[in-house]
Image (tube, rainbow, N blue to C red):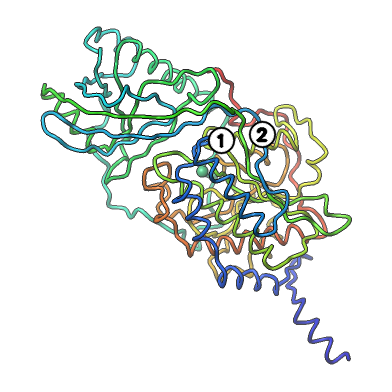
Amino acid sequence: MRKIILPFIAALYVYIANAQETVNLQMMQQIKDEAKNNSQVKMIAHNLTDICGPRLTNSPGYDCALDWLTSISKNWGLVNAGREPWGEFGKGWRSNVATLALKTPYYENIIAYPKPWCKSTPKSIKASMIMLNNLDSATIDSVGPALAGKLVMIRPSNTTIPDTFEPYATRYADTALDNIPDKYMVSRKQIETFLPFIKKDYYTKLYLEKKGAAGLITSNRNSIDGTVFVDGGTAYAKGYAATLPEMKISREDYLKLMRLLDDKRNVELEMNVQNTFYDKDLTGYNFIAEIPGTDPNLKTEIVMLGGHLDSWAGGTGATDNAAGCIVAMEAVRILKALNVQPRRTIRIALWGGEEQGLYGSFGYVKKHFGDPATMQLKSEQSKISAYYNLDNGSGKIRGIYLQNNDSLRAIFKTWLEPFNDMGATGISRSNTGSTDHISFDAVGIPGFQFIQDELEYETRTHHSNMDTYDHLSFEDLQQASIIMAAFVYNTAMRDKMLPRKPLPSPERLVFDFDFPL
Ligand SMILES: [Zn+2]
């Protein structure tokens, strides 16, 4: 009997040990096999991007995604799947028509996208252009009645386009990973410095409309080569009037319009912007689903994973952040398909309102775990082992940021070992910010964002019209789903919860700013 049983047991439970940390290597291999043989990353991507379209928070596209995620989760056998309210977000918004063309001195189509939460034009309008040197009330006043009925542009401070000698897409060198410095971190002070500019921008646009302007044409310096970056807008919040119709256009078009106006030419545009606002339900929702824990002593503890589900509206939010949702959904699908019996409960959360200020995850954390402003913690805060986030584009996982928690280095090193040959070797001590794990970190819960290859995220897709399905790297997403599934599994099976940093002192979350502006 022994001779038969021993090799059997040895095959079932092959562990590697490192500083008392153990990894079930057979399970790691099963996760790899399931991800490779039955991958659903393309199917999930197609539904979230091509089918639902842009997922601006509280828009029909966002709703579509919530409904689809709920139904697919039920098909997979996840439990407690559905939307969970996190507080008041505000109005939804959708673009129905958005066209802009040069009519005089000749016809030309202009690459243009409406700014979210701007007003509609009264049907299609044809109007002359005027250029203001600055967008402020003094400049608006100095123009006087000449503004009436005009489409306005603002003189750009830089009149050349950036060169493109550097490649759009990059990957990290293996040697760079451990030393990645703090990334995407924003301080409370920076936010407070920035808020007056958002406020001024909002009220100046209201003033511009009051003085008779028909619409506003704007552009970013890096909106070149057919890529247009379009985000922002504050009029989602309850009680905020929408600003005038505004279109973001390509830089090349913008600079041409400037040169024509500087040459005293009559420039006429035809603009048709038709949007719908949705204000019946101002509540914001996250998506939640679970694989229940099975250990009688540990099943009330949880391990969470996710990313934000909402997007901007110029593209279909493929890399920002359908990518993170695809990976997190695929990770739980893999674990469910393998019929793992996790000791702790595994909970996926896909957040709303991230793009406006981490609202969905922050609302969830306040509701379940505590408010960083007071550090009054709820009992659930002591029951969550970790939250793993993905929101840095479509690039594969190259390692993890420790968020300064050195006690996790040896643990994560062991967990990454089975995936070293897939490029995931890095452990950076640094902090990374500007996404949803920050809401967890702020109340003392171990919250992490993985190190991801950048690909063309910063240069092409982040908040642009090119953030679409075809800019996803499916090989990278598949690799990421394997590692996310592994980290979640290991966290759920470990004897103890992950070690924590000392509790932070009470401080408002960096994105917790006051409305009304
Ligand atoms: Zn994002």
Total tally of numbered discs in the picture: 2
The kind of residue tagged 2 is: Trp
Q: Circle 1 sits in a helix, a strand or a loop, which is it?
A: loop
Q: Is residue 281 above or below residue 13?
A: above
Q: Residues within 10 Å of mark 1 (few under 14, many from 20)?
A: many
Q: Locate residue 510: give its quadrant.
A: top right
Residue 311 in the figure: left or right of residue 495: left
Give the residue at x 40% y 44%: 315
Q: Is residue 357 left or right of residue 336?
A: left
- Image coords of residue 74 (percent x, y): 67, 54
Query: Relative to residue 230, is residue 458 depicted above or below?
Result: below
For residue 459, side relative to residue 436 (left or right): left
User: Which of 292 and 425 lies nearest the eye of the viewer?
Assistant: 292
Quadrant including the N terminus: bottom right
Indicate if the residue with disc 2 has its beta carbon within 8 Å of ligand 1. Answer: no
What residue is rendered at 56% in x and 60% in y?
A: 480
Q: Which residue is rendered at x = 77% and y = 55% of the image?
A: 292
Q: Position of residue 50 (x, y in %)?
A: 44, 51
What residue is at 37 percent from the left and 39 percent from the top? 229
Mark 2 and mark 1 in contact (Cβ < 8 Å)? yes
Q: Nearer the viewer, residue 28 or 423?
A: 28
Marks 1 and 2, the one that precedes in the sequence: 2
- Residue 239 on image: x %, y %: 53, 17
Q: Which mark is residue 353?
A: 1
In the rendered image, which residue does mark 2 sit on? Answer: 86
- Residue 400 figure quarter: bottom right
**Which amino acid lies under the numbered mark 1 shown in the image of this protein?**
Gly
Choose between 148 and 409: the one closer to the eye. Answer: 148
- On residue 137, which mark appears? none
Q: Is residue 127 left or right of residue 462?
A: left
